[in-house]
Amino acid sequence: MATIRADDLIDSVADALQYISYYHPQDFIEAMGAAYAVEESPAARDAIAQILTNSRLCAEGHRPLCQDTGIVVAFVKIGMGARIDMTGHEGQVLADLVNEGVRRAYQMPDNRLRASIVADPAFKRANTRDNTPAVTHVELVAGDAIDITVAAKGGGSENKAHFAMLNPSDSVADWVLSVVPEMGAGWCPPGMLGIGIGGSAEQAMLLAKESLMEPIDLPLLRARGASTPIEHLRLEIVDRVNALGIGAQGLGGLTTLLDVKVRDYPTHAASLPVAVIPNCAATRHVHFRLDGSGRATLAPPDLSRWPKVDWAPDTNVRRVSLDTLTREEMAGWKAGERLLVSGRLLTGRDAAHKRICALLEAGQPLPDGLSFQNRVIYYVGPVDPVGKEVVGPAGPTTANRMDRFTETMLGTAGLLAMIGKAERGHDAVDVIRQHGASYLIAVGGAAYLVAQAIRHSRVVAFAELGMEAVYEFEVSDMPVTVAVTPAGESVHESGPAAWKGRAVRIPVVPA
């Protein structure tokens, strides 16, 4: 019987979460590099280049790949012959040990991670401040070791999960093809889909989530050929989804999916439960084993295998001053056009928008010093800075969560433009058109790269909201793309339409 010390489990969880905050899985980054090599869409190729450059910067600087450092999910498989020595942790249970590892990882001074978890989710939604609790799944298995896989799942991709109870005669592939367009680009493609088939409702969701922990092997599968119905299903879904032309960040392109994973489980004769969960461009997971010999050791990846991609803006890109921006200037922008913006911009996410709009709609003044008149807002909740940083990784959050506030922010508050990620809803696009405003996107999954453009940061209002407070950033040459023009043209419609049916198959990555 192996005895695993509770402190070794805690330390290993903490180490693993720090590790995955700045190291992509090597198979994922190599697959992204292969997608970059074959991409023909200039907008999608630029977005993938930013993601790849961001990945190397984070791996070298040990800073988070994404400002959304995720909700922690732990899959713990405990050998029936294993024993946990709870000395110093009497009265606690396994979930307490995992949570202590999360707490230590997210509060580590040299690489403090963003706390995103809120308690009382239906009402107060108060931030727990240390990213606990994790979602912990426990399974008893044969053996005398403990195998743990930890993942940090971003809200943008998690929010795009779908579940359905299909009829037994329905096509799983057809259903997946019907929901992928509904997912939009908020999950930051290119990425993966995890699909769970069978069992019960909750089992299908768990199968889908756990399948995302598997390594990317689609190019190898394609090279040798499918030999099972599940493998044929994987290939069918990848090819059909990529043919939709959604592309990187939804801008239109050849690659939307890098892989599809499918797990199944026996189910009731009258049922066909199916779940799909995407993994985003900030895919983060790692496995380790505890056998009683001490805390787990995670070897750094071989950075020489990272694609040799160093993003730089186009030489002919349009430069924009946020401090002198006018509606007349924005009227000349084209959907899909890339910009470098400089000057002062405000930030705000869900919680801040809710407060701001409540005040404006009640005819009450905003906090002293806060005005959105002729300003640009960035939808972001940054990571805390460390060392000499002005701000930590500061990539965009999914913009359509702010759609409900758009009329008030444009019509009453006086905003000129917004920066976020992914598409806006049809009603929001119409409001943008009516006000002659614009919506720009930054690349989701390039948070550390984006942060390099931020020269100054200060809290303007609602400091108690933490990462959801309103900041003012001063930026220099921050890369963005015009997503919705003042005329109401959306690149998330025109881009995929232009690339639909033009997908190519990603080649096998050389060993």
Image (tube, helix red, strand yellow):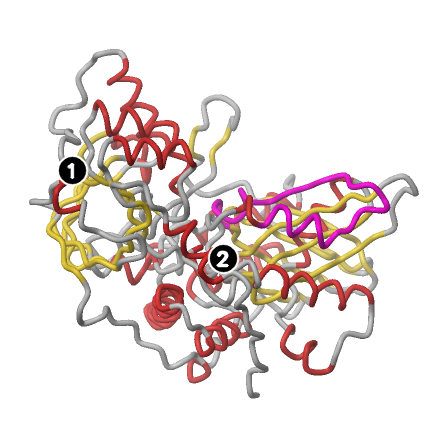
Q: Which residues are magenta?
A: 154-180
**Residue 340: assigned label:** none
Q: Is residue 274 above or below residue 302?
A: above
Q: Position of residue 132 (x, y in %)?
A: 51, 41
Q: Quadrant of the N terminus?
A: bottom right
Q: Position of residue 107 (x, y in %)?
A: 39, 49
Foreground pick, 373 / 83: 373
Q: Secondary structure at mark 2?
A: loop
Q: Is residue 92 above or below residue 414?
A: below
Q: Secondary structure at mark 1?
A: loop
Label 2 – label 1 distance at C-alpha: 31 Å
Residue type for callout 2: Ile
Q: Is residue 188 magenta?
A: no
Q: Position of residue 171 (x, y in %)?
A: 78, 51
Q: Residue at x 33, y 55 (%)?
A: 109
Q: Quadrant of residue 233?
A: bottom right
Left or right: where 76 falls relative to 489: right
Q: Position of residue 73 (x, y in %)?
A: 59, 50
Foreground pick, 90 / 147: 147
**Residue 375: assigned label:** 1
Q: Quadrant of residue 466?
A: top left
**Residue 246: assigned label:** 2
Residue type for callout 1: Arg
Q: Earlier in the sequence, mark 2 or mark 1?
A: 2
